Amino acid sequence: KNEVEQSPQNLTAQEGEFITINCSYSVGISALHWLQQHPGGGIVSLFMLSSGKKKHGRLIATINIQEKHSSLHITASHPRDSAVYICVLIQGAQKLVFGQGTRLTINP
Amino acid sequence: DAGVIQSPRHEVTEMGQEVTLRCKPISGHNSLFWYRQTMMRGLELLIYFNNNVPIDDSGMPEDRFSAKMPNASFSTLKIQPSEPRDSAVYFCASSLGSGTANTGELFFGEGSRLTVL
């Protein structure tokens, strides 16, 4: 069983829809990153979470340490949100475990 | 600030040749990470430096790979000799902090796409 599972693997939605991407894991972590990789390949770190919730613009990330689950939400989605979203577990101080990513496509 | 700068952006080389990838982190950041991304394996952390010192190189695939950080503003990832299976996009990232758990946001370079023929 993989240590981290993202769902869905692929998601296509219409502009304006509310988007949720999930990350479930089976190991103890100290924190979790959400990364966004644009179609051109560039990677942007969206959030680093160790508890609770963070919000940045239309993006919201939550984490429940007890349930070993994190979600990334996008409100009022836009075609420019089309990207691959990657959940990254941080174990201890340094070990990183990467999810396989969720490919999001927002159609106009 | 110009962000994390990587070079070259693209490199095509023949098997057996030496490849050197370069990274300039954001000024003031004290942690630097090298990642590799392939279709098969996704993103993998190769090595991580803190204050120019390699902290964890357990992700480095084999002895053909080496990384250095001679000063706070420059790092190299070298592959010698290169093999076709090394073809990937290599990303450098920097942050401020003492470990991946303690850092704030990671800032990524645009990547170096390596093709080994």
Image: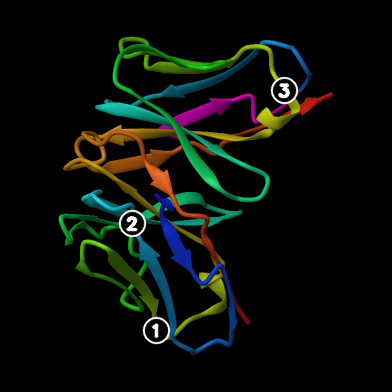
Q: Which mark is residue B110?
A: none
What segment is highlighted magenta in the picture?
A1-12
Color theme of the render: rainbow
Q: Which residue is mark 1?
A: B80
The residue most toward the right is: A108
Q: Residue at x 54, y 72 (%)?
A: B85
Side of A24 relative to B24 (left or right): right
Residue nearest the observer in this picture, A3 or A104: A104
Q: Is residue A49 left or right of residue A2?
A: left
Query: In the image, what residue occupies the spot 29% across and 27% down?
Result: A31
Tell me the kind of residue under disc 2: Pro
Q: What's the distance in space between the residues labelled 3 and 1, CA to CA?
A: 44 Å
The residue located at (50%, 29%) in the rendering is: A5
With respect to residue A82, does B34 lie above or below? below
Q: Residues within 10 Å of mark 2 (few under 14, many from 20)?
A: many
Q: Amino acid at mark 3?
A: His
Q: Are marks 3 and 2 in contact (CB under 8 Å)?
A: no
Q: Is residue A61 visible?
A: yes
Disc 1 packing (10 Å; few <14; some 14–19; many ≥20): some
Membership of A6 in magenta stretch: yes
Left/right of residue A55 with respect to residue A9 in the rendered view: left
What chain does badge 2 belong to? Answer: B
**SS of the residue under disc 1:** loop
Give the answer, above or below, for where A34 lies relative to B60: above
Q: Would you call the spot at circle 3 few (<14 residues within 10 Å), some (14-19), or many (20 or more)? A: some
Distance from label 3 to label 2 (Cα)? 31 Å
Q: Amino acid at mark 1?
A: Gln
Per the image, the residue denoted by label 3 is: A78
- What is the number of the mark on residue B25? 2
* Residue B63, magenta (yes or no): no
